[in-house]
Amino acid sequence: MMRALAGALIIGLVAPSLGIYLVQRRLSLIGDGIGHVALTGVGVGLLLNQSPVLTAVIVAAIGAVGVELIRERGRTSGDLALALLFYGGIAGGVVLVSLSDDASSNSLVQYLFGSLITTSPQDIAVIAVLGGAVLFAMLMFRPALFAVSNDEEYAKVSGLPVRALNLLMAVTTAVTVTIAMRTVGLLLISALMVIPVAAAQQVTRGFRTTMAAAMAIGLFAAGSGIVVSAEADTPPGATTVVLALAVFVALTVGAVGWRVVQRRRAEPPREIEPPDVVLQKA
Amino acid sequence: MQVTSVVEVKRAAVGYEGREILHDVSLTVEPGEVVAVLGANGSGKSTLIRTILGLVPLRRGEIDLFGTPQRKFRDWARVGYVPQRLGAGSGVPATVGEVVSSGRLARRGIFRMAGAADRQAVKDALTAVGLLDRYSDPVSTLSGGQQQRTLIARALAGKPDLLVLDEPTAGVDAGSQEAFAAALGRFRSEGGTILLVAHELGPLRPLIDRAVVVHEGRIAYEGPPPEPAGHHAEPDHDHVHPHAVQPAAGICEWAPTDRIAAN
């Protein structure tokens, strides 16, 4: 339980710190796609009797770099290429897992939806080290990553190493997806990258505050997700995502309500102006 | 000693996917000059400056920036680029200060944290465009003209020697256009060089030293900025009325569609 909680909290903190750049670039679904590709990596690992986390990191990173290179070439043809990559990734994963010695539907579900209870101390060490590295990169390069995500052409003209930064994003996305695989599972990872950001930006004004708020929401959702799932005997990954969505809904409703109250207070109700042009009746 | 040109384009040709947009274009911008590239929509004027900035690859010819071949040019902090509009502008909020701070990255590099000099430069740039009081406001709450001024501030924050602006006045209200012209005037008086693309000059006209008209991928005219009256006589004239920005924008709807994509 403590191990599960530690792993979940790390993911809850790291995923939104990366997800904010993906949301800013309108690539909210990319984590999902990389998750599909990572499943092929899991299949390779099980088939070769290697650590599935290791092979998943490698295959997901190759996939993410491939996606980035496709994206760089132009967005129109990229859409279809991404679809092929994603479906190839999940189909390949299912086939490879079924071919392995560990071919029970149980092992597949474990990766698709997460299985924190089986997390070993070794897994936690891997999650902590890789998660710490991703978090460091996201905070350290925040101004540069913000510039590239906000306006890629401007960043290029500024002489920033745009391609290196994009590849850094691709690889860190793959790493985050893979370490989160045990917590929320490959099908719900993207949710932890995106939903806290979506929730935070309902109430924030700047990028930095959004990032901090998203990380706090991610931490809260992951932590309470583990506790609630243990109490209610529900799957931890899905519970975490549901809680994050609940925060999103609460903040959205709260922000809308707050704005309505502010507006009522700011300006007294005015009379409706008469229309400029009055149509004459025939 | 000979003074090196800020921008030198020699017999440049540019194209996308087999179709050539610019044929044999040559252009020189000297230090301290303000040059306007004019032309109808689809004439290739935006392509020309995007090529100078290295955003579009050159097919033939050469481009030098500050006397260095563009391919080897690394001193990008000397160039301040002002795009037509704010980037994709997704849902993630960003304050005016945060956007303008991006302009310091070219100077300080990606490994160094922002220091006092960076913060001061951002404040100076925002003061120059009259938006310092909006520092902590999300850019999404600004008007189109104020967003344009934010982009100019972002370029000025890097303390460039050359400003390159792509249609800076398109769809900008008259008040912002004046503030814009004032900021550019100050930049020029401090020795800065300006290269801008415009569909119409409006209040920027008094600043312009030289105009270059691009027509069908070639330079059709080079000299003092054409007067509105004479310019009206041209078959594809730009309708220049500062108060009539919207009708002018409508022209593009009637431009040949096969060339719009290239702009």
Image: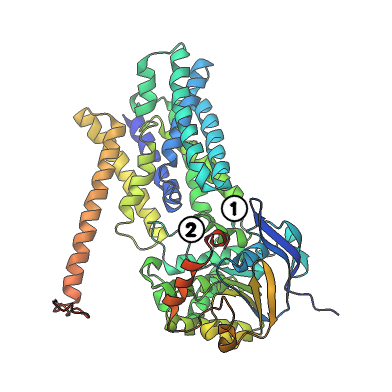
Q: Along the horizontal axis of the image, is B203 left or right of B211?
A: left
Nearest to N terminus: mark 1 or mark 2: 2
In the rendered image, the residue lying farthest to the front is: A282
The secondary element bearing badge 1 is classed as helix
Q: Which mark is residue A150?
A: 2
Pointer 2: residues within 10 angstroms few (<14), some, or many (20+)?
many
Pick the quarter of the image with the N terminus of chain B.
Answer: bottom right
Q: Please, is residue A233 above or below residue B262 in the view?
A: above
Q: Quadrant of the C terminus of chain B?
A: bottom right
For the point 72% across and 79% down, which residue is it? B31
Q: Position of residue A172 (x, y in %)?
A: 51, 41
Front residue of B141/A250: it is B141
Secondary-structure class at tag 2: helix
In percent of width and height, residue A130 lies at: 50, 37
Residue drawn where x is 48% and y is 74% of the image: B170
- The residue at 63%/86% (across/down) is B189
- Report in which chain the residue with disc 1 lies: A
* Residue located farthest toward the right when viewing the structure as drawn: B1
Residue type at the position of mark 1: Val
Q: Which mark is residue A162?
A: 1
